[in-house]
Amino acid sequence: MDSPTPPDVAAVTAVREIALAAGAAAALRLSLIHMNTDPDTLRRLLWLLTCHGVFEDAGDDRYRHTPSSRLLREDAPRSLRYMVLWATEPWTWAVWPRLDEAVRNGKGVFTDTFGKEFFTYLHEDAPESAGVFDRAMTQSSALSARAIAAVLDLSGARRVADIAGGQGLLLATLLDHNPHLDGVLFDLPDGGSLAGRCRLAPGDCRVSVDVDADVFILKNILEWDDESTVTALRNVAGSARPGDRVVVIENLVDGSPEMRFTTAMDLLLLLNVDGKKHTRAGLTALVERAGLRVERVAPVGPYLHLIDSRVAG
C-alpha cells in the first residue's frame, strides 16, 4: 500500500527554528523570525508555547529563551533536540490518530498504516527520519554514557559487545574508561563507525547473534513486544558462554522522574513497533524468561536502571 502523506508539521519546525534563531540573544522579535509562516498565526503559536514554559513573552512581540527552549538547541550542553525531533517525525502524525485502535486491540498500527515494518520503512522510505533516529540515540547515549561507565565494573572482562549499539558512543566511552578492553559494535549493516580497538559486526539481534565477547550490553533497545524482547535476549545468551554477563539498561516506567515523557514514549512504542516501556518487575521477568540469572538491579543516574545478569550453566 502507498504510504500516507503526513499532515503539516509546521508547528514542530517553528519551535525548532525559533530556538535556533534566538541564539544567545536576550530576546527575539517576531518580525526577525524568517520562516514561511503567517505572522499572526505564529504569534498565536508562541502564546501557546509561552503558556507551557517553552518561551517567555518579553512584551512588544519579543520572546526570550527558557531552560526548556534551550534544550532544543544542538549546542546546549544537555541538548534534547534530536530526541524531540524523533518523537515528532512526520510518520508520528500518521499513527497517533489511530491510538484508539491500538488501545482496543493491544497491537501497533505502523505496518498497517505504511505497509512495512517500522525499521524497514525508515531505511527504505524515510532515510532522513532514520538519520534523526541515529542522532537521537547518539544524543541519548551522550547524556548517559559517562554515568554508565562510572557504575559498570568491567575490570575482569576481556571484550564487551554493544548490541544494537547505533553509532557506538556508549561503547567508545566504555573503551576509554577501560583501556584493557576490546569492543564489538553489533548493529544493522549501516550502523556504527568505530575503529581501533573495536570491530563492527553486522546483524539483527532479533534474528541471531554471533559475537565473541564476555560482556553483552543492550541499552534502550528492548522496547519491542515481549516475544521479540525474549528472542533477542535468548539470541545474545546463545552467543555467550556460561557465566558471561548480559547487561540490560533501560528507562523503567516505575523508575522515571519524568513520567510524562516515559508514558508518552510507552504509547508511541506501542503504535510503531508493538512495543512498550517496562516496569522493573516486568523487564526482570523477561530477562529471566530468556534463561538469564539476574544478579542485581541498580539505578544509573536519574533516568536509567541497569539489570546485571549472567548466562546460566
Image (cartoon, rainbow, N blue to C red):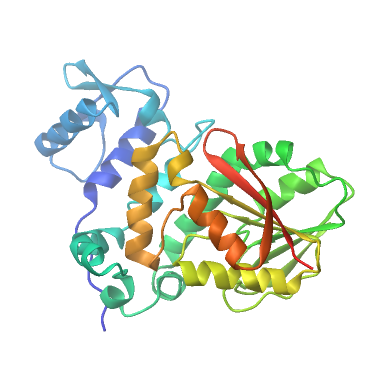
Instruction: From this view, report whether residue 2 is shown above or below residue 145.
Output: below
Q: Nearest the camera: 211 or 18?
A: 211
Tell me if I can see residue 257 in this picture. yes
Instruction: From this view, report whether residue 3 is shown above or below residue 90.
Output: below
Instruction: From this view, report whether residue 145 is shown above or below residue 65.
Output: below
Q: With 178 as the anchor, is 45 left or right in this view? A: left
Q: With 74 as the anchor, is 177 left or right in this view? A: right
Image quadrant where residue 167 sits: bottom right
Instruction: Spot the residue most to the left.
Output: 40
Q: Nearest the camera: 268 or 19?
A: 268
Q: Nearest the camera: 294 or 16?
A: 294
Image quadrant where residue 200 sits: bottom right
Residue at image location 20% in from the left, 56% down from the top: 8
Residue at image location 41% in from the left, 58% down from the top: 276
Image quadrant for the N terminus? Answer: bottom left
Image quadrant where residue 243 sits: bottom right
- Where residue 240 appears, x then y in whole percent? 77, 69
Instruction: From this view, report whether residue 240 is shown above or below residue 43.
Output: below
Image quadrant for the C terminus? Answer: bottom right
Tell me if I can see residue 221 in this picture. no
**Total numbered labels:** 0
- Where residue 42 appears, x then y in whole percent? 16, 37
Q: Nearest the camera: 230 or 195?
A: 230
Residue at image location 65% in from the left, 73% down from the top: 235
- Where residue 7 appears, x then y in whole percent? 19, 60
- Where residue 256 appears, x then y in whole percent? 46, 38
Q: With 206 as the anchor, is 185 left or right in this view? A: right
